Amino acid sequence: MSQAAAEPRPVAIPAPIPLREIAPWALFAGVVLLALLYLVGMDQGATSVFSGEVLHEFVHDGRHLLGFPCH
């Protein structure tokens, strides 16, 4: 079995994305994640944004999954 000389393949190098293009999306994602963390983990009692138990019951299993005590 003879081996033919392998031709080197061109390597695809990804273009770098400038930080100024990533920063607004990272900030937006951080704000959304913090809002979700508040709504799932801490929205009850005196700091509640929504009145009643609807939100608490809606995210009840998620609270336990994330380790937040709720009763």
Image (cartoon, grey):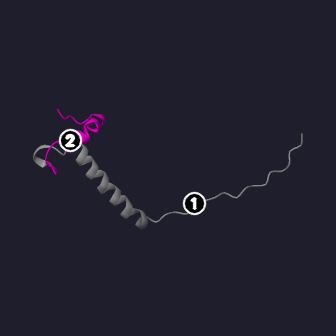
Q: Which residue is mark 1?
A: 14
Tag nearer the camera, 2 or 1: 2
In the image, which disc is placed on residue 56?
2
Q: Amino acid at mark 2?
A: His
Mark 2–mark 1 Cα distance, whole angstroms, equals 44 Å
Which image quarter holds the N terminus?
A: top right
Residue 59 in the image: x percent, y percent?
26, 41
Q: Which is nearer the N-term, disc 2 or disc 1? A: 1
Q: Residue at x 75, y 55 (%)?
A: 8
**Is 24 placed left or right of 45 in the picture?**
right
Residue 28 in the image: x percent, y percent?
33, 60
Give, as a single range, the part of the protein colored magenta: 48-71
Query: In the image, is residue 40 above or below residue 28?
Result: above
Residue found at the far right of this picture:
1
Q: Nearer the viewer, residue 49 or 20?
A: 49
Question: What secondary structure is found at the residue carrying circle 1?
Answer: loop
**Is 7 placed left or right of 46 in the picture?**
right
Q: Residues within 10 Å of mark 1 (few under 14, many from 20)?
A: few
In the image, which disc is placed on residue 35?
none
Q: Residue at x 14, y 45 (%)?
A: 52
